[in-house]
Each structure stands twice: as C-alpha cells, then as structure tokens.
Image: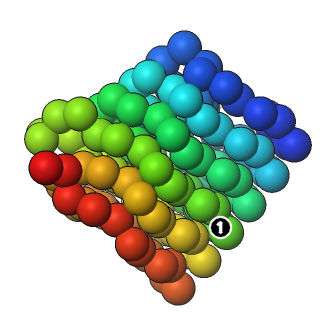
C-alpha cells in the first residue's frame, strides 16, 4: 500500500490505522485533526512514513505502535498535538526496529514523553508538559 501526497483530515479516529499488515509507504502526506491519534499500527511491519506532517490532533497515544517490526519515520514533523490522558504518551512503541530519523517534535502537549522501544536519531524535540 502506498499513500502519497495526500491530506488525511480528521480521518474518524486515527489518521492511519493498520492491523496485521505489511509493506506500507506513506510519503509527503499531511495527517491532521484526528480525534484518537495520528497513527495506530498493530502486528504490522515494513512501514515507512517519509516527509509527513502530523499535527493538530487529540486523543490517546498519538503514535501507537504495538507488536510491530521495521517501522521508520523519516523527515516527519509531529507538531501541536494534545494527549488527553496521563496514561497515554506521544509515542507508545512495542516491537522491533522502530526508528525516528530527522524528525521534528514541537508544541505537543502530554504528561508522558516515553518512546518505548523506538530509537530517535537526529531528531529535534521542543514539547511542553501538560498542565
């Protein structure tokens, strides 16, 4: 599956959701104003988000990656999202080989900034704790 040059506006619950899937590429796509979070992947692998803008969403874990493998976020901008619940996080990750490279995090509001199994490389983070 390839999603390219799209605008995913308020996509119901999550901007991109995949269960028991593989080989997904999301490129140059804007994901915004979602009500549960930005991305939810469950038992899914070989997924790349490249040069995507993910912003102005609210809800639970913004990027929820459960039992995943070979997931890459490259050159993505994750900004101005709001996590409602103290038990949720900006990124919740369980799995193997989850990487964020050259990504920019700014203006996200949440009580928990845990990244789980995810590795961050050459990323900038300028977020705020929820009051």
Residue shown at 70% from the left, 53% from the top: 52
* Residue 62 pos. (x, y %): 40, 41
Residue extending furthest right?
A: 5
Residue shown at 19% from the left, 50% from the top: 130
**Foreground: 64 or 112?**
112
Is 37 left or right of 94, judged from the image as shown?
right
Residue shown at 41% from the left, 59% from the top: 107
**Foreground: 45 or 114?**
114
* Residue 108 pos. (x, y %): 38, 54
> In the picture, which quadrant includes the N terminus?
top right
Residue extending furthest front?
A: 131
Q: Examine the rendered structure and indicate whether residue 109 appears above or below residue 105.
A: above
Tell me the residue that label 1 is attached to: 74
**Foreground: 34 or 100?**
34
Q: Is residue 32 visible?
A: yes
Q: Write down the quadrant of residue 12 in the picture.
A: top right
Q: Is residue 17 visible?
A: no
Residue extending furthest top?
A: 12
* Residue 42 pos. (x, y %): 43, 33
Residue extending furthest bottom?
A: 122
Q: How many discs appear?
A: 1
According to the image, what is the colour scheme of the structure?
A: rainbow
Q: Write down the quadrant of residue 31 in the picture.
A: top right
Residue shown at 54% from the left, 70% from the top: 104
Q: Write down the quadrant of residue 15 in the picture.
A: top right
């Amino acid at each position: 599956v390839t999603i390219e040059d799209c605008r995913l506006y308020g996509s119901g619950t999550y901007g991109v959701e995949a269960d028991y899937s593989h080989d997904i590429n999301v490129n140059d796509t804007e994901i915004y104003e979602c009500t549960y979070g930005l991305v939810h992947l469950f038992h899914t692998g070989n997924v790349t988000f490249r040069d995507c803008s993910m912003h102005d969403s609210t809800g639970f874990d913004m990027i929820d990656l459960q039992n995943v493998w070979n997931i890459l976020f490259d050159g993505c901008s994750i900004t101005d999202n709001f996590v409602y619940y103290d038990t949720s996080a900006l990124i919740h990750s369980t799995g193997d080989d989850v990487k964020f490279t050259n990504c920019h995090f700014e203006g996200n509001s949440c009580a928990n900034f845990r990244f789980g199994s995810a590795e961050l490389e050459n990323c900038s983070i300028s977020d705020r704790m929820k009051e």
